[in-house]
Image: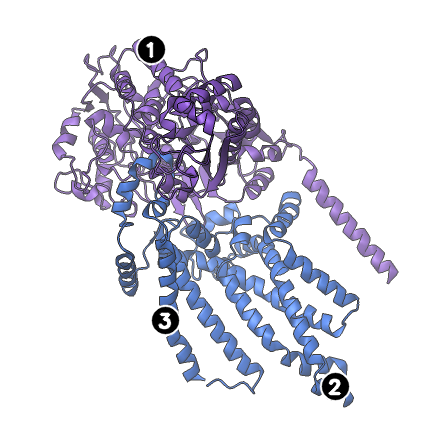
Chain colours: A blue, B purple
Amino acid sequence: MTAFVVRRLLLLPLVAFGVTLLIFGLLQMLSPQMRAALYVTDPRQLRAVDSIIRTHGLDKPFHTQYVGWLGRVVRGDLGWSETAKMPVARAIGTFFPATLELTIFAVVPILVVGIWLGTLSAVHRDRVVDHFSRFFAISGTSMPTFVWGLLLLMVFYGAWQLFPPGRLSLEPNMYVLSQQFRPYTRLMTVDALLNGQLWIFVDALRHLALPVLTLSLVSCATLVRVTRSSMLETLRQDYVRTARAKGLNDGVVVNKHARKNAMIPVVTMSALLFVGLLNGVAITETVFGYPGIGLWGVNAAIQLDAAAVAGFALFNALLLVVGNLAADILYALIDPRIRLR
Amino acid sequence: MRRLRRQVLVLLALTLSLSLVGLTGTATGQAVKNPDTFIQVSFGDWDTFDYAWAYDTSSHTVIFNVYEPLIFYDGGRTDRFVPRLATAVPSLQNGLISPDGKTYTFPIREGVKFHDGTPMTAEDAAYSLRRFLLVDRDGGPSSLLLEPILRMTKTRDDKGNLTLRFSDLERAVQVKGNNVVVTLKEPFGPFLSIMALWSNVASKKWAAANGDWDGTAATMARYNNLKKESSAFFEKANGTGPFKLERWDRAGKQVILVRNEGYWRTPARLSRVVFRSIDEAATRILMLKAGDADSIAISRREQPQVDDDPTNIRFIDNLPWLRIDGFFFTVDIDTRGNPDVGSGRLDGAGIPANFFSDIRVRRGFAYAFDYVTFLRDAFRNQGTLPKGMIPPGMLGFDAKREYFTQSREKAVAEFREAWGGAVWERGFRLTVLYNTGNIPREVGARILKDGVEALNPKFRVDVRGITWASYLAAMNDGKLPVFWVGWVADYPDPHNFAFHFLHSDGTFPKAQRFKNEELDRLVMQAIKETNKEKRQELYFQVNQKFFELAPSVSPVHQVVFRVQRSWVRGWYNNPVFPGTYFYTIFKR
């Protein structure tokens, strides 16, 4: 097991190298004038395009730019993000906790409801529950995230003013930014509790409610479908029939025998889902004015912020490798027949 | 079971109706939320708070409330000034402008303190001006003062070496007693207009203590074209203005200002100003309606969404805007591998590189454009029909002057004579481009297409939207046959438009490869003229040439609007302000 983990982790630099090379290569296909658009945001600056290209070395050959960047990365400097107005490493450290918090809160209802509804749907195949869950899954995945987000925002904020957008309301926000508040983890709910400020904790939860609900509605649906198909296949297996023939009650057959064995694709899906959420949920973050890493990543890509895009990709590669590794380890725990060598 | 279902149905119906009431209904007079705090929600980020570096509206709005210039605009007027950190506005009458119009003396106010409690002096004012000239970052605002003071537009040669000498700075900006004396190379009519926005005063000691320029010759090269993050002023500020910069919270995409209790005038009534950046317009609108925002930025398209609650939301329309948009013709197009010029020849399937060098082609396009439809479809009829490249209310604007209106006859006449009749006979094909996301430009491009294609079945105009990055690159390379772009005034003077629209060294003529020696001479003659009446006459002539030669066409005079809560009081508009001036604002 340890050898497997080490081997997978050793792959990481290779993956990172490949990803950044690709990103840099793609960006290099754009002319220096196009890449200068990152710095020229107003027609009043048009006359300065050539000097901007010179100052930022945008006309240097690809290998010079890439090697220079790589050299700085080795020294721990990921460069400057023009979109975040801070160093790339600091930008990741700044925006990632918000997305992590959102993901942690969203992943619980996604997994619980997704697996529960998927199982229920398979067990009660072609009955009301199954029809309902399929309707839920289809509507959840077919309705765009921004539509869900805006609908929820209009009802729960616009009409009822229950769950506002952003990360905190005005007064809690001012308190958090003051000297009195110590940011231990940068997860707002956790820090609020560690600082003993329950009112800030409650306010942070109010702001998390709608993005979490939006993500749950969208992502849960996929998990319901995967769980349902996997369960249907498992329920047709001989050992399930045998268990039922032995006289075991249905609850034990489904929960102990079938569900555990149906979990392999669900674990894969969940791991990808989790990593996907961590990579940033740009649309949800945009609709709710929630400043997470996804929003920054998208803005960086739109503005051709090369250092930010490369740093973001590097970070995502790390998340993906670790996420896949976690999924592999979980396979082994769920199904002892799987050996990790 | 049936009863349970009925109950669920009733509950669902109730929830839905309540939601709909909330969504469509209008609230009656809400109580003032956060009475001491103003929350402004917009989109886009702040670039830097270095007064010599920032050139974007968001950053400049913050700077404008934290720092103060030597003189300032008088209320909503753009042609009258009041003293601010100077005690008098220089004029020929009070002797603070020399008879030759080159030397300006600013007596510095005593008793003013910076936010850190240290006194502001004439030395600080001179240092701040010198630093503004020195920083001169690529594409930054320094050229606005470099041009009048040192008669140069940049401080580096083509290899990036500093050409500005410390002695130039010392000679141009001097401290004499408690005065700051600025000596221009030549008279420059709008000098005070520029100073009223761009002469912010920062603390020299504070700058040096925080690692910025110490004001000496020995270190000056290090601070020319410096990286924005290297500046001490990047995220910190120590001005004299009515508000202090408390924090730039980049994680939360917000900037917080607090009242300067030690302000030399009566302190502001608001205790705090919060700028927040939210990309999604619908979210900003909901925040305004909920009272969590006092003012928001939206586009004209979103106007109907805030029109439904006049009790709580004020939509203030038809505010003057010192902005001119135009469609520009490139007179020497780079046709190499260029898909927007078709065949690259005047054969009915394309255009040659010099297609727009014939004045008749340009005027034909100008007469073919439907200005009335454009004003209606792109701006909901808010604005006025164009009268040239000088905005209404500015010196040189004349509402009675002749300018283009749509005329099929005139358009046909121009095209019939263009290129010796070859254009009309053979026809052409080209593409009009706009940057995606800019709806008025897209609407305008389509109206231009319809107008031109209706003249002759052999005329073919395609319309294509491209990203800003591609647009910028193509514009810079001279690849766009016709492009749409706009200019917002740096200061309220026609020179700012005349130079960049018509002078061969100006921003747009360079991109168009357009040069006309008579225009160059006229533009420079107008800027040196100190007599107001004579200047006005010269700008009438410049505007007339703009009409006759049509290097670009101004399709509309735009106005701007503001959306704010009804409880906001004390706001006033000055078209040259980069954003809201919060000193006079309160909530009630």
Q: Are marks 3 and 1 in contact (CB under 8 Å)?
A: no
Q: Secondary structure at mark 3?
A: helix
The residue at which mark 1 appears reads as B537
- What residue is shown at x 44% (from left), y 49% (from top)? A302
Quadrant location, the N terminus of chain B: bottom right
Closer-to-camera residue (A131/B220): A131
Q: CA gap, disc 3 to disc 1?
A: 70 Å
Q: Are marks 3 and 1 on the same chain?
A: no
Q: Position of residue B304 (x, y in %)?
A: 61, 33
Q: CA gap, disc 2 to disc 3?
A: 47 Å
Residue type, label 2: Arg
The residue at which mark 3 appears reads as A14
Closer-to-camera residue (B553/B104): B553
Q: Quadrant of residue B80?
A: top left
The answer to whether B10 is drawn above or below residue B498 in the figure is below
The residue at which mark 2 appears reads as A241
Quadrant location, the C terminus of chain B: top right
**Badge count:** 3
